[in-house]
Image: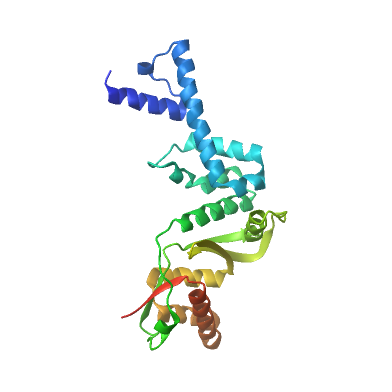
Amino acid sequence: MMLADLQRDFQRWLVAATPAASLGDGARAMAGLAVYQNNYRAQLVGCLEQSYPQLRAWIGDEAFRTAAITHIDRHPPHAWTLDAYADGFDRTLVELFPHNPDVHELAWVEHALAAAFIAADARCVPLDALAGIDWDTALLSITPSFRSIAVGTNVEQIWSALWQGQAPPDGAMLERPAGLLVWRRGYVSCLKQVDAIEREALLRLHDSGSFAGLCDWLVERLGEYDGVARAGELLAGWLASELIVGIDAV
């Protein structure tokens, strides 16, 4: 038996306990293998617990453990580091809690905040760099730590309460769709709820970089006066929040 075959069969056993002749099929062999599989699953459960402490507090230990085991059965580790194993847990929760969007939205928030913290560094735009910019041709760069999702629940309030150690509000649907922005400012990961227009505006700017194009889109949506005014308001807020980290002239 080649070592590679033995390693392959052992990996299959850890992931799904599939029969593997090369590993032996006696009672003693199976008992020994079960120890390794239990350790494998326990480490992955522990990884998810460390990655999602607020989610665990929100849904409870039993529900969290059930969700974690389901995720482990469906998704073996996909990277060299366990830090990456938390990726995609929110998608498993969509399947397990289809009528509780606050659950998978909270999981997204927790993962996005952690990912933003280790994202590439970027410097904010100094105020003196804004003088003389031709905004008709300017291309804006968004911080590499930026992440966003459309949400339908009060997950931002739930997260904030859990993070501060306060009693969270009950999960509830928002009156109108909104968006969440996550990014890192200095050494702090930030979370902000915005309306659907601001979220889409920032996504458009992230994709194209064109401030003039963003103004045109806002004018189409809101009319000339309100569109231009909203563009200026959004730009000022994004600069102050250090979401914009570069301005280049074409």
Q: Is residue 131 above or below residue 117?
A: below
**Location of the C terminus (image quadrant):** bottom left
Residue for point 58% across, 39% down:
67
Q: Residue furthest front?
A: 187
Residue 87 placement, left or right of 160: left
Where, by quadrant of the figure, is residue 119 drawn? bottom left
Give the percent coordinates (x, y) of residue 105: 58, 54
Please count the marks in the image: 0
Residue for point 40% across, 82% down:
129
Q: Is residue 130 above or below residue 47?
A: below
Residue 182 placement, left or right of 24: right
The residue lying toward the viewer, choosing from 22 and 38, is 38
Give the percent coordinates (x, y) of residue 221: 52, 78
The residue lying toward the viewer, choosing from 180 and 39, is 39
Where, by quadrant of the figure, is residue 29 drawn? top left
Residue for point 41% across, 70% down:
123
**Location of the N terminus (image quadrant):** top left
Q: Residue furthest left?
A: 2
The residue lying toward the viewer, choosing from 46 and 135, is 46
Q: Is residue 187 above or below residue 225?
A: above
Q: How is the image coloured?
A: rainbow
Give the percent coordinates (x, y) of residue 103: 62, 50
Residue 21 placement, left or right of 158: left
Residue for point 50% across, 69% down:
200
Give the percent coordinates (x, y) of residue 170: 72, 54
